[in-house]
Image: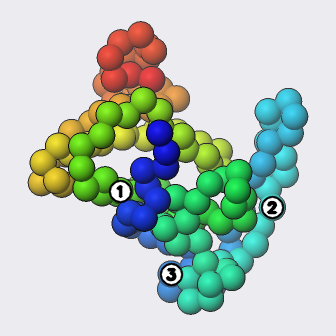
Amino acid sequence: MGNLALGRKLRADTMCGQNATELFCFYSENADLTCRQPKCDKCNAAHSHLAHPPSAMADSSFRFPRTWWQSAEDVHREKIQLDLEAEFYFTHLIMVFKSPRPAAMVLDRSQDFGKTWKPYKYFATNCSATFGLEDDVVKKGAI
């Protein structure tokens, strides 16, 4: 058991500050799980102390709480790709968000080294409206 992303290439469509300095905001939770007021900062991919590259997604949010990947500003669709280079049996996938979770997300997988992709799990606040699936945690694939 371990972090399968360590030492592997993580790719994303965008990165905060990839073209110029950007302002971004992130959220944390209060003890009652409500969101605190957002904290805002600047990011710039050209400066390591202001960068939030895709490779930071592999960092432990517990050991390295100040590193994370941040998408570019005003992105509504993002693709993140991790090549595991081998076949694995997944039991857990842990994702920690610095902002409210996306309203919808699809976890795709490829079993032919990236030639074709198929949805593995769907996540949404409304699966029927977003994906045409019943909103049911019991049905296979729907969460």
Q: Residues within 10 Å of mark 3 (few under 14, many from 20)?
A: some
Q: CA distance from mark 1 to mark 2?
A: 29 Å
Query: Which residue corresponds to mark 3?
Result: 18
User: Does 51 sit above or below residue 10?
Assistant: below
Amino acid type, residue under disc 3 in the picture = Gln
Q: Residue 108 placed where, x, y %? A: 30, 42
Q: Residue 94 placed where, x, y %? A: 54, 40
Element type where label 2 sits in the image: strand
Amino acid type, residue under disc 2 in the picture = Lys
Element type where label 3 sits in the image: loop
- Taking the spot 49% from the left edge, 45% from the top edge, the residue there is 2
The mark that comes first in sequence, 3 or 1, is: 3
Between 71 and 65, the residue placed more toward the observer is: 65
Amino acid type, residue under disc 1 in the picture = Leu
Element type where label 1 sits in the image: strand
Judge from the rendering whether residue 3 lies leftward or rightward of residue 23; answer left or right: left
Is residue 72 at all visible to an observer of this figure?
no
| Marker disc for residue 15 | none
Residue occupying the far top of the picture: 138
Query: Which residue corresponds to mark 1?
Result: 82
The mark that comes first in sequence, 1 or 2, is: 2
Between 51 and 63, the residue placed more toward the observer is: 63
Q: Name the colouring of the figure.
A: rainbow
- Taking the spot 86% from the left edge, 39% from the top edge, the residue there is 30
Dots 2, 3 in contact, CB < 8 A? no
